Image (cartoon, grey):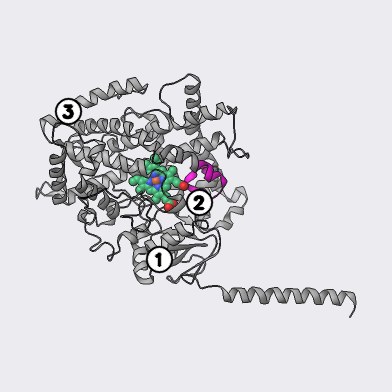
Amino acid sequence: MDARTNELAIVAITLLATVVLLYAKGTRRAPLPPGPRGIPFFGNMFQFNVMRPNPQYLKWAQKYGPVFSVKLGGQRIVVLNSSEAADELFVTRSKLYSSHESPHVGFDLVSDQQRMVFMPYGREWKISRKNVHGLLGPGPSKQMRKMQELESRVMLHDLLCHGETSITEDFVEGPHGKVPERHWFSIIRRYTTSLMMTLVYGRRIERIVDNPELHKVYDVMANITHVCQPGSYLVDALPFLRWLPDMLAPWRAEGRKMHEWEMAFWGKLFSDSRTALLNGAGFNGFVQSYLRARAEAGLEDLPGKGATEDAAGWMRDKLVTYTAVSIIEAGSDTTSTAVFSFVLLMLSNPDALQRAKEEMDLVVGSSRMPEWEDEDRLPWLTACIKETLRRAPPFPLGIPHKADEDDVYNGYLIPKGSTVVGNIWAIHMDPVRYPDPSAFKPERFYNPDGKLNWASGPDTHNRDHYIFGWGRRFCSGKYVAEASLFIVLSRLIWGFELHAASDPQTGKARLPGVNEEDTFTDGLVSAPKIYPVGFKPRSEKHAEMITASYKDVQNDWQSMGLAGDER
Ligand code: HEM
């Protein structure tokens, strides 16, 4: 054999060995989790409503068990349907499963890869999350309670003024969940958004009607939700399309334009915060406090995105901006969704509502409003809140995680790059864990003795519900959310007789059915669509107290250097 033949033989043997090794490795690979058979190229895309997958996912969970898999175009989706499976992967193996799915248009283009909620698990996310934790952790979140207490008094006043407006006037929900200004939903949304804006930028939302800033916040939030919904952009399901040239990829220019549009708004809020800091403004939000600390470290100007490479890892301007945005977006509509579901479920279950009022009268009475200290003494109310969160989780499928490596669970392969969904809906609908799961039964969580067990405790196995997700990506705002739900809902029950609109023909209450899909919106967050409710003060004394406390709050705003309410 000459040298050339030798070379060819070596190449051939190497290739053969590689093929044999790959084949052997392939056959050794564990099988994929079971799931419905799909069709080439599209996978299971046409077998379920991608905008509202949870009803079909529940059926498949009942058929295939704790883990199944489907394909959406080129994307493998692994769905975890038991708390044990979600716990094992998201908590015990959190090193592999702590990335969030990052939609190409919504994250790479519109967010310039800076929106924390969609970040993969890596250094930038860790830096952003650490700063958020410094603001929302168990200790710091207690400082928010004063704002929650004051803002909830404004909410009571607004509901008092609202009375029956949403019953007597005809309101129509706009595209992408746009809520009419005078509807009671807007009053609750003002509370949650104002709280987040104050937390982050040190500025309140002092009015609902004719407030362009508030509309812009909602427009931006609605836009990113819409952009990130599966099905909005084919390129999210078929990643190879990312490599197309600009002329064949119109979403690229569109995404970048949306980024500029967002930044014109959020960037201005950021620079206003910087100006306020220079002028020594009164109340501090997260952005001002961060910029102050950064300036003290000698880094007043730090343009660009990402963080400094040194151990301190200071966030540059764009990462600060988007960390703030992430808090506002993650904390506003989620909390208000839970309030809308609570009112709907309580009105649909008058016995539970009646019992909550009786408990309130006994514990709080009519000469003062509920306060933080009442929490442990209102176990029925707390049970009603928890049952609402179980029955109507704001994110029925959580926020999708991603597998950063190949992994095997229960003998099944979870390939690297798979989207991994914690199916909160199926876990909450498990009839063994929650008998008669469709029914609203606060007694499941009623515990009149002892400390109440909210979802934020360290025991991940025995949580009452899973609405805040799992592991290292567990909701950063859970303490703030739980406190808001307690103060808002306890005061709502304390102050008002709630009543639904009645059918003019039969005189019976007219409410959207909680078991009907059409009652809730499609998408990642499943919120009740607008429905009318009347708010009647429980007595003249209650009404007077609400009005007086609203007037008092105006003095608080003034002494805190915050804008007073305009009505
Ligand atoms: C009832 C209200 C709320 C619900 C149902 C909720 C639910 C969730 C869920 C399911 C996640 C993802 C968890 C996972 O990946 O496993 C999450 C993440 C997050 N939440 Fe909440 N949340 C609520 C309120 C809030 C509030 C009030 C704030 C802020 C004050 C907040 C801030 C965040 C942030 C910043 C993240 C992103 C964490 C990360 O990417 O690492 N949330 N939330």
Residue 497 picture location, percent across and down: 14, 40
Would you call the spot at circle 1 few (<14 residues within 10 Å), some (14-19), or many (20 or more)?
some
Image: 172 above or below 1? above
Judge left or right: residue 190 versus residue 159: right
Residue at the outermost bottom position: 1
Q: Which mark is residue 103?
A: 2
Three-letter amino acid code at disc 3? Met
Three-letter amino acid code at disc 2? Pro
**Is 519 in front, or is 33?**
33
Magenta residues span 110-128
Q: Which mark is residue 47?
A: 1
Q: Which residue is mark 3?
A: 545
Q: Determine the image quadrant of residue 241.
A: bottom right
Image: 78 above or below 34? above
Q: How far apart are the alpha carbons under marks 3 and 2?
A: 48 Å
Q: Quadrant of the N terminus?
A: bottom right
Image: 470 above or below 151? below
> Is residue 115 on the magenta stretch?
yes
> Is residue 443 on the magenta stretch?
no
Image: 343 above or below 465? above
Looking at the rendered image, the disc whose residue lies closer to the viewer, 2 or 1, is 2
Mark 2 or 1 closer to N-term? 1
Would you call the spot at circle 3 few (<14 residues within 10 Å), some (14-19), or many (20 or more)?
some
Residue 192 picture location, percent across and down: 33, 37
